[in-house]
Amino acid sequence: MGGIDSPYVTLSCRIRMPAVGLGTWSLKGSAGIDAMLKALELGYRLLDTATYYRNEREVGEAVRQSGIPREEIFITTKIYPTEYGRPDEALEGSLDRLGLGYADMAMLHHPAADDLRAWGAIERAIAQGEARCGGLSCYSPSQARDFMARVKVRPQVVQNEIHPYFQDAASVRGLQDLGLAVQSWYPLGGRGHVRRILKDKTIVAIAQAHGVSPSQAVLRWELQRGIMVIPGSSDEKHLRENLDLFSFELSEDEMARMAALERGEKHGWA
């Protein structure tokens, strides 16, 4: 997959998925609903949630309050490994909490012993119109390859940790070579690390050269690697910035300087 220069990516199943979305893991309660409503008002059309986030009800409520037609908003949710033993019940619970009729993408949150059984529930949900497509999170290329060889309906997206200090370039290429779209769930480095990354002198210099914020420079770098992004924020200024990524482009030299920041520094799930 080449760089992403459009607000939407067409998956191999021909479903269009926003290239930039909102990660909602920290958005809970009425404040979370307000933040999601603001994001939707600004133009976000992908909200990423999960059973583990405990905010599926808030996501559904934000979509309903927004007044935006349901079919214009892409909703991703995930079932957690502790639910893989009862996946149909788990997925039905997610759909009930969302209250939106269907999920655009249902994902497995992590690899686990029962992931094939859990995927069967996603396949059934797709067949019944309760999900439009399925995806994986935290899978390596070898895990994804083995997984795809054993399922009927292939996953469309793999969502992994990817940021300037953990670029995981070989895995990104490997997943893309399998025909899978790649999405970063920690595009700015994740909890406790964002400030440090966005103050990196190389990132600051590249951002200043384009008159954009450091977060915009990082997210644009990921899009140019063919990686979709779901940064999380409740701040209106940051929400605006993180969505405005198609008015500038990093040069080959700037992309190389960003690549040189690799530290193998993983911040999330091992």
Image (spheres, rainbow, N blue to C red):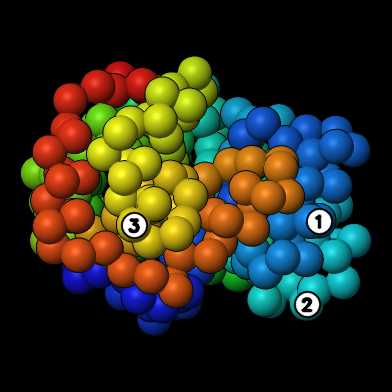
Q: Mark 1 to mark 3: distance in Å? A: 32 Å
Number of other residues with Cα within 10 Å of mark 3, as a class: few under 14, some 14 to 19, many 20 or more: few
How much space separates mark 1 and mark 2, taking CA atoms?
13 Å
Q: Amino acid at mark 1?
A: Leu
Residue at left offset 19%, top offset 34% = 261
Residue shown at the point (54%, 54%) measured from the top left: 242
Q: Which amino acid lies under the numbered mark 2 shown in the image of this protein? A: Pro
Residue 70: which numbered mark, if any? Answer: none
The residue under label 3 is which amino acid type? Ala
Question: What residue does disc 2 label?
Answer: 69
Give the image location of residue 18, x and y in percent. Answer: 50, 68
Residue 37 image label: 1
Q: Give the residue number, with chain letter if any, for mark 3.
A: 209
Closer to viewer: mark 1 or mark 2: 1
Query: Residue 170 lies in what quarter of the image?
Result: top left
Label 2: few (<14), some (14–19) or many (≥20) C-alpha neighbours in 10 Å = few
Q: Secondary structure at mark 1?
A: helix
Secondary-structure class at tag 3: helix
Q: Secondary structure at mark 2?
A: loop
Quadrant of the image containing the N terminus: bottom left
Q: Which numbered disc flags the more N-terminal residue, 1 or 3?
A: 1
